[in-house]
């Protein structure tokens, strides 16, 4: 997965106007199969008290606690380390952004059948002390993404708009209702690049099959390699679900790191118990 990918003039124009770009031919059939294997390997990682990766749970529509997301695995998983820090993806971002990019954070959203959706938001509000950086994100579909199983939906051109943000760090409901939301359906192996100011959301997985997606966010190399610093802070203020201490209030961390996500359902369930 180290071969560069060339961005055409048409792709560049679409990205600049719409705020996102879908790449349908970025991964080969073999690479897609590898991706699926790696995603399962991250899912199966043991949740020990000293693990460096950060798994988060949610309460799904059946009232069951399931894995929602795992973050911070590129340092320890060789396959993902090569994919996310190799030549291909960073070169795509450099062509689109005009600057060399480095990995800032990575996650896998395990949107299993019955799992919840993500409220309308822009990513830049969720990086805490790092939100002033210039971020670009890449979504890589590990499974087909459809409207039924909760694919991403975007407001085209919203990266150029003044998007109103509420006190909960999500987009103001009146703005959400007034805009046209476009579903971005993807096949396994497709990639989507978008910036941290693009308005997006996703619905719950109402299908009978799981839908997994890898997200990797990058910042300009000139701003520094801040990957480990970000995760050190995140793990402190919003730790993995299994590492939380009873009686500790993580609401401030949730406001920065879990706004609009199904992960908040864990706190709600705990408050009701």
Image (cartoon, grey):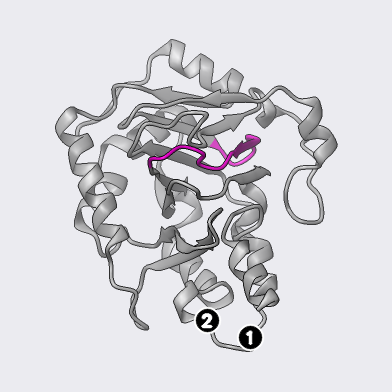
Residue 187 screen position, x and y as percent = 35, 27
- Labels 2 and 1 touching (C-beta < 8 A): yes
Total numbered labels placed on residues in the image:
2
Mark 2, residue position: 244
Asked if the stretch drawn in magenta spans residue 201, the answer is yes
Residue 48 screen position, x and y as percent = 33, 80
Q: Residues within 10 Å of mark 2 (few under 14, many from 20)?
A: some
By secondary structure, the bulk of the magenta-drawn segment is best described as loop
Asked if residue 1 shows in the view, the reply is no
Mark 1, residue position: 248
Residue 272, image quadrant: bottom right
Is 216 placed left or right of 199 in the picture?
left
Tell me if residue 143 comes above or below residue 49 in the rendering: above
Q: CA distance from mark 2 to mark 1?
A: 8 Å
Tell me if residue 254 comes above or below residue 180 in the rendering: below
Q: Residue at x 37, y 31 (%)?
A: 144
Asked if residue 248 shows in the view, the reply is yes
Q: Secondary structure at mark 1?
A: loop
Q: Residue at x 58, y 39 (%)?
A: 203
Residue 1, image quadrant: top left
Residue 237 screen position, x and y as percent = 59, 75
Tell me if residue 36 comes above or below residue 44 in the rendering: above
Q: Residue at x 42, y 60 (%)?
A: 71
Tell me if residue 246 comes above or below residue 80 in the rendering: below
Q: Residue at x 48, y 36 (%)?
A: 149
Q: Secondary structure at mark 2?
A: loop
Residue 85 screen position, x and y as percent = 30, 48
Magenta-drawn segment: 195-209
From the viewer's side, name the closer residue of 70 and 97. 70
């Amino acid at each position: 997965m180290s071969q560069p990918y060339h961005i055409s003039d048409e792709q560049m124009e679409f990205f600049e106007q719409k705020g996102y770009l879908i790449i349908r031919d970025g991964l080969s059939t073999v690479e897609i199969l590898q991706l699926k294997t790696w995603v399962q390997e991250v899912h199966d990682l043991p949740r020990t008290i000293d693990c460096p990766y950060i798994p988060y749970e949610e309460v799904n529509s059946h009232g069951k606690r399931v894995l929602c997301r795992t973050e911070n695995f590129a340092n320890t998983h060789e396959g993902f380390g090569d994919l996310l820090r190799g030549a291909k993806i960073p070169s795509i971002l450099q062509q689109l952004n005009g600057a060399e990019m480095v990995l800032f954070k990575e996650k896998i959203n395990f949107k299993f059948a019955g799992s919840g959706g993500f409220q309308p938001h822009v990513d830049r509000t969720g990086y805490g002390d790092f939100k002033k950086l210039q971020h670009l994100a890449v979504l890589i579909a590990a499974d087909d993404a459809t409207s039924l199983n909760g694919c991403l939906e975007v407001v085209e051109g919203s990266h150029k708009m003044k998007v109103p943000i509420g006190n909960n760090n999500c987009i103001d409901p009146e703005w959400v209702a007034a805009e046209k939301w476009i579903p971005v359906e993807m096949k396994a192996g497709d990639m989507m690049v978008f910036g941290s100011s693009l308005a997006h959301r996703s619905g719950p997985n109402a299908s009978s099959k799981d839908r997994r997606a890898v997200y990797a966010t990058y910042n300009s190399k000139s701003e520094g390699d801040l990957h480990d610093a970000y995760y050190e802070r995140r793990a402190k203020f919003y730790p993995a679900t299994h590492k939380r201490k009873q009686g500790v209030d993580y609401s401030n961390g949730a406001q920065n790191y879990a706004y609009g996500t199904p992960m908040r359902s864990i706190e709600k369930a705990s408050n009701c118990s």
